[in-house]
Structure formats: structure tokens, C-alpha cells
Amino acid sequence: MIIPQKIAQGITTVDADEITEDDARRAGAASVAEALAALRGTPGQPVYRIGLEWIGEDPRIALSSAAYLAATPDDL
């Protein structure tokens, strides 16, 4: 299982009325209506767009399979 690591590239506010179908798909929703239904809060509150960038696999995956981490206290 690959667990991605991402880093925030920027946070901006957007009007909910300006969310496009492409925005919705990039957020994991099938449509604008689905994306808007997933928002919390009340109408008129800010909607934040957070840009993310892939920076690689989570290094904890490799560390978790390292033999020295599987040692018992008596082995140390």
C-alpha cells in the first residue's frame, strides 16, 4: 500500500458559486452538487481551496519493515 505524502501549496478562499465541475472532480466529488453537499457550515461562510503537491511515499512504510524495529527488548 502506497501512502502518499503531500505538501500544501497554497490556501485560498473561493465563492461556493464559483466551484466548477473540474474543481469538484479534483476534490473527489462526482459533481459540484456533491462537493457542495459535503461542505460544513452555513451558506455564506468561506470555502477554502487547499492546493496539494505529491512529494513522495511515506517513509514510515520502509521504516515499519526494518528488522531492528521488530526486535524484542531482549535483543537490544
Image (cartoon, rainbow, N blue to C red):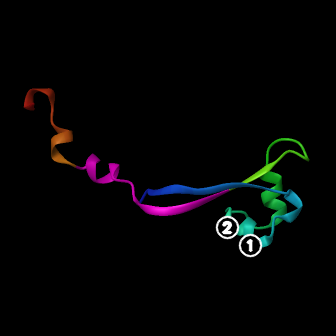
| Left or right: where 60 falls relative to 14 | left
Nearest the eye: 47 or 73: 47
Q: Which residues are magenta?
A: 50-65
Say which quarter of the image contains residue 45. Answer: top right
22 w.r.t. 1: above or below? below
Circle 1 packing at 10 Å, graded few (<14), some (14-19), many (20+), is few
User: Which mark is drawn over residue 22?
Assistant: 1
| Left or right: where 2 falls relative to 30 | left
Q: Residue at x 9, y 30 (%)?
A: 76
Q: Quadrant of the N terminus?
A: bottom left
Across and down, in percent, residue 23 comes to 74, 67
Nearest the eye: 3 or 19: 19
Report helix, strand or loop for mark 1.
helix
Tag 1 and tag 2, C-beta contact below 8 Å: yes
31 in magenta: no
Report helix, strand or loop for mark 2.
helix
Q: Residue at x 15, y 31 (%)?
A: 72
54 w.r.t. 13: above or below? below
- Which amino acid, by three-letter code, is at mark 2? Arg
Q: Residue at x 14, y 27 (%)?
A: 73
Across and down, in percent, residue 59 comes to 33, 53
- Which amino acid, by three-letter code, is at mark 1? Asp
How many badges with numbers are in the image? 2
Say which quarter of the image contains residue 22. Answer: bottom right
| Left or right: where 4 falls relative to 30 | left
- For this orientation, the residue located farthest to the bottom is 22
User: Which mark is drawn over residue 58?
Assistant: none
User: Which mark is drawn over residue 26?
Assistant: 2
Q: Residue at x 27, y 48 (%)?
A: 63
- For this orientation, the residue located farthest to the top is 74
Circle 2 packing at 10 Å, graded few (<14), some (14-19), many (20+), is few
Q: CA distance from mark 1 to mark 2?
A: 6 Å
